[in-house]
Image (spheres, grey):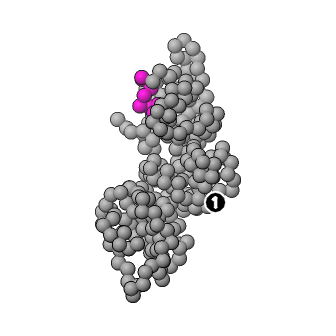
Amino acid sequence: MIEELQGKHYIWRTADSCEELIHFALAPSVVLQMGKWHAFWLLEDAPPEPQRFAFTAGGRRPHVVRCKLNLKYKYRDFEAANRVPEETVQRILAQPETSARRNTERELEVIATLRKCGMSSEGIKAIFQEQAIGDPYRDIGSMLGSLTMVDELTQDIVQHYETAGFHYNHDGVILWFNLASVLRWWYPKRRGDGLRALPQKEMAALLNAQAQKIGSYILSGGKKWHANVCWRMHGIDLEIAKGLGVIRGE
């Protein structure tokens, strides 16, 4: 195991107990135990000060508790994880009280906090794939079903609204769109890209739940005229979405 870590980029931490060591938003890629506990977060890129694992154990081999050599993070996400508030870390690590797939309030709050800390979409997905907060979504086969799918829908709307053919109204600040017409375009696109999508009712419920959050970039309940027809619209506050990193700023 030690040999397999050589030549890789990682962050290395030690602690007296496993609980102390893994009390962190990002799940470690590797956990070893021999006397002290050792955790490694493998990185896709080199940290500013590369670390070298120095293990003195009198020739004994460490006990490998966890080994996921394909679980790698961006260094920026590791930095962001250090900024995650303790309350949010506890939510990430705690077993959910219910596995109801539409009970997303807790998860949406966690995602909003992770974004504010600077976590990338890939980092957020890794948290829901590896930590307890994602358990209900793994159990029902939807993984993150859910929770970053509103971001993905938003990104596609912003990139393609001028050519996709769905009903929209852009006033320069808010990009309004009719959800039903968007989903008629989006589902075939997702299938063509080899990606999954939630059913329309669940997407609408998820979008409305996001819109109810204070400071969300999603607005709901708007009615806008498009082609002489009044459509019920959702909106994307482009400045807030840029500030959260959901879409790129120009």
Where is residue 127 drawn, in percent x and y? 51, 55
Quadrant into which the C terminus falls: top left
In the displayed structure, would residue 44 be above or below residue 30?
A: above
Residue drawn at (57%, 14%), measured in percent from left and top? 229
Q: Which residue is mark 1?
A: 95
Residue drawn at (38%, 74%), measured in percent from left and top? 2
Magenta range: 154-163
In the displayed structure, would residue 235 be above or below residue 125?
A: above
Main SS category, magenta section:
helix
Q: Amino acid at mark 1?
A: Gln
> Could you say which quadrant of the image residue 209 lies in?
top right
> Could you say which quadrant of the image residue 38 lies in?
bottom left
In the displayed structure, would residue 12 be above or below residue 90?
A: below
Residue 235 visible, this angle:
no
Query: Which of these two is toward me, 201 or 47?
Result: 201
Residue 195 visible, this angle:
yes
Count of numbered badges drawn on the protein: 1
In the displayed structure, would residue 174 be above or below residue 17?
A: above
Query: Which of these two is toward me, 154 or 28?
Result: 28
Q: Secondary structure at mark 1?
A: loop
Q: In the image, is residue 160 part of the stretch drawn in magenta?
A: yes
Q: Residue furthest top?
A: 228
Where is residue 228 drawn, in percent x and y? 54, 12
Query: Which of these two is toward me, 53 or 225?
Result: 53
Residue drawn at (55%, 38%), measured in percent from left and top? 197
Where is residue 19 drawn, in percent x and y? 55, 72
Q: In the image, is residue 69 part of the stretch drawn in magenta?
A: no
- Say whether residue 104 is left or right of residue 195: right
Q: Residues within 10 Å of mark 1 (few under 14, many from 20)?
A: some
- Say whether residue 108 is left or right of residue 57: right
